[in-house]
């Protein structure tokens, strides 16, 4: 598939499915890590270990500015804030 079509298709996946898809092959892994579509906005609604790892990777790996971060803590475990808050505070200068 052309990169544009693959990016569009992968863009419909939720964070956990996107993480699984990124391990399907080297091309998909590179695409999901480098494409601005997947890291310019982070909408975190799942709080699995893989989702938190993804958030960490995106915030630490992003070299630009203006990442939009949305945290939906409504159904999060009670201790997730103690995990997410230090991570987010270290990258506040990159968030919009």
Image (cartoon, rainbow, N blue to C red):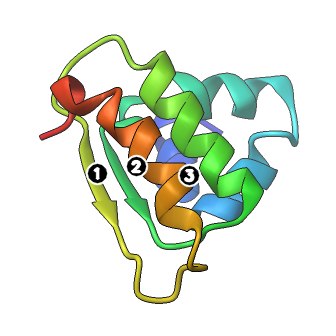
Is residue 11 shown to the viewer in this render? Answer: no
Q: Residue furthest right?
A: 24
Q: Position of residue 77 (x, y in %)?
A: 61, 79
Rendered view: 38 above or below 62: below
Quick one: 42 or 33, which is closer to the camera? 42
> What residue is rendered at 87% in x and 42% in y?
24
Foreground label between 1 and 3: 3
> What residue is rendered at 43% in x and 30% in y?
59
Is residue 83 shown to the viewer in this render? Answer: yes
Residue 24 in the figure: left or right of residue 45:
right
Res. 80 image quadrant:
bottom right
Local secondary structure at mark 2: helix
Res. 16 image quadrant:
bottom right
Local secondary structure at mark 1: strand
Task: Give the residue at mark 1.
Answer: 69
Local secondary structure at mark 3: helix
Q: Are marks 2 and 3 in contact (CB under 8 Å)?
A: yes
Q: Position of residue 12 (x, y in %)?
A: 50, 66
Q: Position of residue 45 (x, y in %)?
A: 48, 73
Task: Give the residue at mark 3.
Answer: 83
Rendered view: 43 above or below 64: below
Q: Quadrant of the C terminus?
A: top left
Q: Residue furthest top?
A: 63
> What residue is rendered at 25% in x and 15% in y?
64
Rendered view: 72 above or below 93: below
Q: Quadrant of the N terminus?
A: top right
Foreground label between 2 and 1: 2
Task: Give the residue at mark 2.
Answer: 85
């Amino acid at each position: 598939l052309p990169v544009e079509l693959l990016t569009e298709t992968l863009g419909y996946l939720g964070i956990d499915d996107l993480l699984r898809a990124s391990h399907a092959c080297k091309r998909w892994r590179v695409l999901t890590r480098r494409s601005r579509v997947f890291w310019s906005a982070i909408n975190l609604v799942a709080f699995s270990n893989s989702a938190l790892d993804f958030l960490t990777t995106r915030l630490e790996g992003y070299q630009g500015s203006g990442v939009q971060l949305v945290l939906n803590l409504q159904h999060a475990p009670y201790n997730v804030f103690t995990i997410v808050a230090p991570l987010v505070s270290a990258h506040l200068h990159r968030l919009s």
